[in-house]
Structure formats: structure tokens, C-alpha cells
Amino acid sequence: MIMTEPASRKVSKPPDELPAGLEAAPTPVEEVELVKRARKGDLTAYDDLVRRYQERIYATIYHMTSNHEDANDLAQEAFIKGFQALRSFKGGSSFYTWVYRIAVNKTINFLKQRKNKAQMSLDDMDFNAEHDPDLVALISDKTPRREVNLAELQEKLNAAMQKLSEPHRLVVTLHDVQGLSHEEIAKIMGCNIGTVRSRLFYARQQLQAYLSDYLQ
Amino acid sequence: MSMNQDTENFGQLRRLLKIKRYEQPPPGYFNDFSSRVIARIRLGERGEDSAVIERLLWEAPWLQRIWAAFEAKPVLAGAFGLAMCGFLISGVIYSEKGDVQPVALIPAAESLPSSTEVANVIAENHPLVARPAALEVSSTNAINPFQMDGPLLRTLHAEPAGFQFPIRN
């Protein structure tokens, strides 16, 4: 199972083909009904909502922190806060965008506090990664550093990600890893699309510089 | 170089970023994730007070930004605390200096003739006007308006009237 990819994608520029086997998007009516019930204190309905978004929320936080334990704590806290603040949810955006914003705010606050104390605790790679043609190509003979293996590449990539500022890391995570559209990212981050684009451009430039040894 | 051209040039990097999609938490991690969240909600892990603060922070983004700034820079929080202490201390000092002397008001009140003096003056000028008995009681005050040693007390201490019903044979 792969834990990325938003359910309802209105991708203006679809990212590279995303992994298969993802959950079906919840219909808005279903979600609205679940939110309504959860607001009245129905924990079964909220449990349903958590199940729908847990993987995406966890993944976003994990890619931001590069630490499983931190991602676990923050993801749980984001959902708890989501339940507590549900009364203030006006329904102007989807629940999914709203809970994403909670998670992102929580993570950015956490990262500001954690500054200079970052310690990576990376998740294991899925077995399928070894069969991904793009990744195979990266570690093949054509790669400048031919001795590199997938685990090392993973570590280098995470280290490079951690060098980015939080907003830049977030944009790369949401767009290039999670596959969200610029519009969705703008909603989550509370900024305009132009800002998202420029941040993405700058972040990619930075990453390319950090990882030049591993890119052709 | 335009942004679109660069998007094309980032192809290699984007392929490398695909690695991130394959990073996974321990097997079965998500099986009981929601149960743990719900259990924590049920336990009310976070007290009502903190929930109110969190809600306030959530509903007032400017407050959230200030809070985040304090969390990120403890020096700023310390400086704010010091400024508040300074403000409080200066307030106390200022209020002590600016206190109005209550003594200043008393002479003005004392300079007014008392009701007894007024009654005496009236009685002297008009012999037909008798001095009021109640005014003879001189040592009354706001707490004890009736001095219980005058004619009023004597009346109260008078022998109780005896009621004897005739006995019928």
C-alpha cells in the first residue's frame, strides 16, 4: 500500500504517474453527512473521516519531518484537534483541505520548535520500489554514482529535503510527492497560486543543487 | 530561462522524489490508527481549558501567529514577559504617587455645623422651640445611630406591664 495521493484531484498539471491502489474518493455528500454527524459528537462518523485521510495526513507530516515517531504524534494530534475544532468548521472548504491545514500548521509550529534538533527516523521502503523503472534507472549503471543503493538515495533525499525551509519543503511534498494541484496547495497554505509556483520552482532548484551527485 | 522550461528540466529530480512515495510506516500501522485517535478523544486527553485556548487560537489567526512566534523564539516571549512586568510595576508606582490624600476631604466635612449645633442655635434664638429629645443623645454615630443610654433606653427598661386576668370561681 502506498500512502500518498489526494482523493479528489483537480490536477492542472498532473505529476508523474502516481502509484496505484489508492482509496476511492469520498463523495462530497457522504463527507458532508459524516462531518455533520461528527459535529454532533458522533465518534463513529469521525472514525470514518479519520480512516479516509489518515494515510495522506501521516504521509505529509512524515515527509515534512523525516521522522516516523514525530509524524505519528503530530498526525494523531491533528485529528484530535480537528475533532475539537469541528464546531468552527464552516464548510467553506472540504473537510479534507481543512484537516490538512490543521496538520500543516501543527507540523510547521513543531518544526520551528525542533529547529537544529532534527533527527531522521525514516520509514522503510516499500518492496515495490525496487521494481519502479524510474528508480531502477537512477541506481543503474547510467547513474553518475553507480555504487549508490536505494537506501542511501533515500537518506540523501531526506537530508536534502530537511535543508529546505518549511514552506518550500511543504510545496515539494504536497506537489511532487503527494500529487496535489497548485490550487489545492494554495488553499491549504493560505496563499495564492503564484506563490505556490514560485516556491516550487525555488525548492526544486535547491534540491537539484543538493542532489547533483545523484542526478544525471 | 522560463519556469516551464525548468519544469521540464526537473524531470530527473521528480523521478528521484518518487522514492518518497515508497516510504512506509511499519506494517499494520494504520490498522488501529483511527482507534487510537478516537480513544484519545474519548479520554479527553486534552483538558477543557486547553481546548478553549486551542479553539481561540484557531479562530484568531493573528493570535496563532503571535503564539507561534513565542514558541519559535523564547527570547521574544521573555522580552514580552519583562515588558509586561515593567508595565505592571510602573503602574503600581504611578498609582501610589497619584493617590489623593483622604485627609484633605475631612476638614471640609468637619467644618459643617452638626445637626445638634444647628438645633441649639435655633432653640436659643427661638425660646418657644424646644430642644428635641433625640438630639440630646450626643454620642451617636453611623454604626450605632441610637445611643442606648438616654430616655429611649429608660423607656425600654421600664417595668413590664402586668396583665392579670380575673379568676372566676
Image (tube, helix red, strand yellow):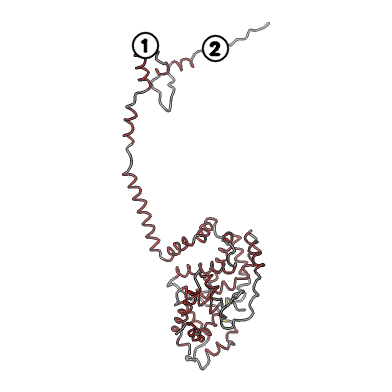
Q: CA distance from mark 1 to mark 2?
A: 37 Å
Q: What residue sits 40% from the left and 61% below the top?
A: B77
**Side (left or right) of A46 relative to B78:** right
What amino acid type is highlighted by mark number 2? Ala
Category of crowding for the residue at label 2, using alpha-carbon neighbours closer than 10 angstroms: few (below 14), some (14–19), many (at least 20): few
Residue B40 in sight: no
Quarter of the picture holding the N terminus of chain A: bottom right
Q: State the image coordinates of residue A174 (x, y, percent, origin top left).
A: 53, 75
Query: Which mark, residue B161?
Result: 2
- Name the subunit of mark 2: B
Say which of B78 and B31 sits in front: B78
Q: Are marks 1 and 2 in contact (CB under 8 Å)?
A: no
Q: Position of residue B63 (x, y in %)?
A: 46, 60
**Residue designated by label 1:** B127
Q: Earlier in the sequence, mark 1 or mark 2?
A: 1
- The residue under the point 55% across, 70% down is A72
Using the rendered image of the protein, determine whether residue A161 is visible from the camera's viewpoint.
yes
Q: Amino acid at mark 1?
A: Pro
Q: Which mark is residue B55?
A: none
Q: Locate residue B54 relative to residue B83 in the image: left or right.
A: right
Name the residue nearer the viewer: A48 or A114: A48
Q: Position of residue B81 (x, y in %)?
A: 39, 57
